Image: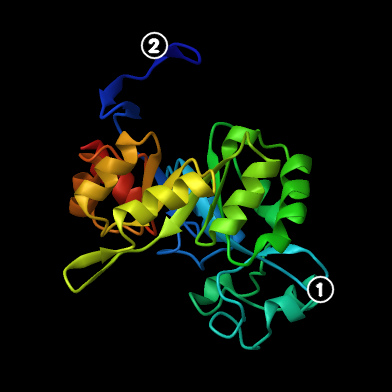
Amino acid sequence: MVIGRGIFLFLTLFAGHLVLGKPLIVAHRGASFDAPENTLPAFELAWEQGADAIEGDFLLTKDNRIVCIHDKTTKRLADQNLVVVESTLEQLKTLDVGSWKNKKYTGTQIPTISEVFATVPKGKNFFVEVKCGPEIIPYLIKEIKKSDLKMDQVRLICFNKEVIKVFKETMPDCKAYWLTGFKKKNGSWKPTLEDVIGTLQACRADGLDSHHSIPPEFSKAVLAAGFEWHAWTINDVITAKGLAKRNIYSITTDRPKLIGSGLSK
């Protein structure tokens, strides 16, 4: 199969789906091992380190702006403890969220989603993790549509299945993945395989983005059911290579350079 200008991608048929030979490398909150998470320096460094995609966390502010931050408060990253949903963009922009990582990042601000969109090169992807409820979706769709990105460059991920459902109802051409972890209790995995497949179908997700501890039989069943399978957060090459052998679509990591080069060997 020829894709683009003379670039050949060899696809393998496995369990009823097509997979690429090498998974995409997704930079978790940017190149967050080396730079302050969810900041423009972290995202720009991720591209420099060869990431295929970046992943960022997003919340809605008091004045309905979408900002890139994981926690509901700024306590962990800044010297002021502001509640994001109770703060305006102007207030949040006064904070230094870089110096905790390294003094060279002093003065780094919390970016808006439009500022992060602007860093994404042609042919690269952006995994948008929504950290709140469906109330963010109308504002997110507006930001996507006014950006220079193509619909197939944006992937929404969320633990909240209602967010996935609402997004897919309005933006069917953008892919969305349900996030979940796995725990073993009394000899059984939670969520169960039936719960996973049922949730993916109910919220019309395009795939599963799971913790890397997902049992092999679960990931195989997800793929066989026609869904994509992605996993987080992998920072060692041995684990990444093991997942690649299981036909994973993407690997999310804090260290895109390390994992990318490790999988190329």
Q: Position of residue 31 (x, y in %)?
A: 45, 57
Closer to the camera, 256 or 229? 229
Q: Is residue 48 visible from the viewing direction of this image?
A: no
Q: Position of residue 65 (x, y in %)?
A: 77, 63
Q: Residue at x 32, y 38 (%)?
A: 223
Left or right: residue 170 versus residue 53 is: right
For badge 1, the amino acid type reads Glu
Q: Which image quarter: residue 254?
A: bottom left
Q: Residue at x 60, y 43 (%)?
A: 120
Q: Which residue is mark 1?
A: 90
For badge 2, the amino acid type reads Met
Closer to the camera, 204 or 21? 204
Q: Position of residue 172 (x, y in %)?
A: 63, 36
Q: What secondary structure is marked by label 1?
A: helix
Closer to the camera, 99 or 144? 144
Closer to the camera, 206 or 258? 206
Q: Any mark on residue 193, and which?
A: none
Packing grade of label 1 (10 A; few <14, some 14-19, many >=20) is few
Gap in Å between the C-alphas at discs 1 and 2? 50 Å
Q: Which residue is mark 2?
A: 1
Q: Residue at x 42, y 63 (%)?
A: 34
Q: Residue at x 51, y 68 (%)?
A: 36
Label located before the other in sequence (1 or 2): 2
Q: Is residue 247 above or below residue 6?
A: below
